[in-house]
Each structure stands twice: as structure tokens, then as C-alpha cells.
Image: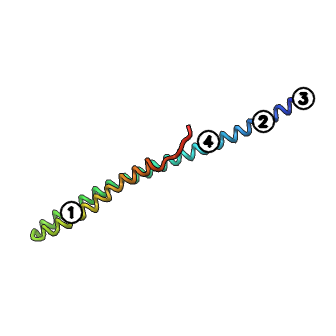
Amino acid sequence: MEVQAQVLRIINKKSNKEQRRKNVTRKVFSRLEMLEGAKSIGVGAATIALAGAAVGIGNVLSSLIHSMARNPSLAKQSFGYAILGFALTEAIALFAPMMAFLISFLFRSHKKS
């Protein structure tokens, strides 16, 4: 009888350890899934900036057309300013995908398979 009780205690200890290990693995996997979700949200937010850059480029070019229509004698000067505004807005449009790629490929969560 006593031997059976000792065997049962040993089995219970092993099962408790195994249960704790399973709980830890579940927590780790849920954290990794949360990190993957947060990473996807970050990539989506970074690519939304492309829409803002498109609106900015449209504003620059529409302002150029309006200024040329109002004062054709300043067309050369306004064209230079429009090209500068276009270049700066396009730089923002290039930074957005760069950040999206950095978020998606550089910040990797390490899953053990």
C-alpha cells in the first residue's frame, strides 16, 4: 500500500511539472501570436502613409496649376517650388514602405518549431 502511494506521488509530481511546462508554452505562444498581430498592425499603419503622400502630391500639383492660372508670369518660379514640394512629399512616400519592410522583416519573433 505504501509503495503504491509513493508511486502515485511520483506520478503526480511528474504530471504537475508537465502541466506547468504546458502552461508556460501556452503563455509563450500566446505572446508570440500577440507580437505577430501587433507587427501586422504596425505594417498596416505604415502603409496607410502612402495614401497621405498621394494626397500631398495632389495638393502640390493642384496648387501649381492654380498659381499658373492666376499669375502666368511667375510660372518658372512656381514650377521650381512645386518640384521641391513634390520631391519632399515623395520622400515621405518612400519612407513608408521602408518602415513597413523593416517592421515585417527585421523585427521577427522567434518561434521554436
Q: Earlier in the sequence, mark 2 or mark 3?
A: 3
Q: The disc labelled 1 sits on which kind of residue?
A: Ile
Where disc 2 sits, the SS reads helix
Q: Quadrant of residue 3?
A: top right
Q: Earlier in the sequence, mark 4 or mark 2?
A: 2
Q: Quadrant of residue 65?
A: bottom left
Mark 3, residue position: 1
Mark 4, residue position: 26
Mark 2, residue position: 12
Give neighbour class at mark 1: few <14, some 14-19, many 20+ (Cα, 10 Å): some
Separation of disc 1 and disc 4 at Cα?
55 Å
Q: Earlier in the sequence, mark 1 or mark 4?
A: 4
Label number found at residue 83: 1
Are the residues at dot 2 and dot 3 in contact (C-beta closer than 8 Å)? no
Q: The disc labelled 4 sits on which kind of residue?
A: Arg
Q: The disc labelled 2 sits on which kind of residue?
A: Asn
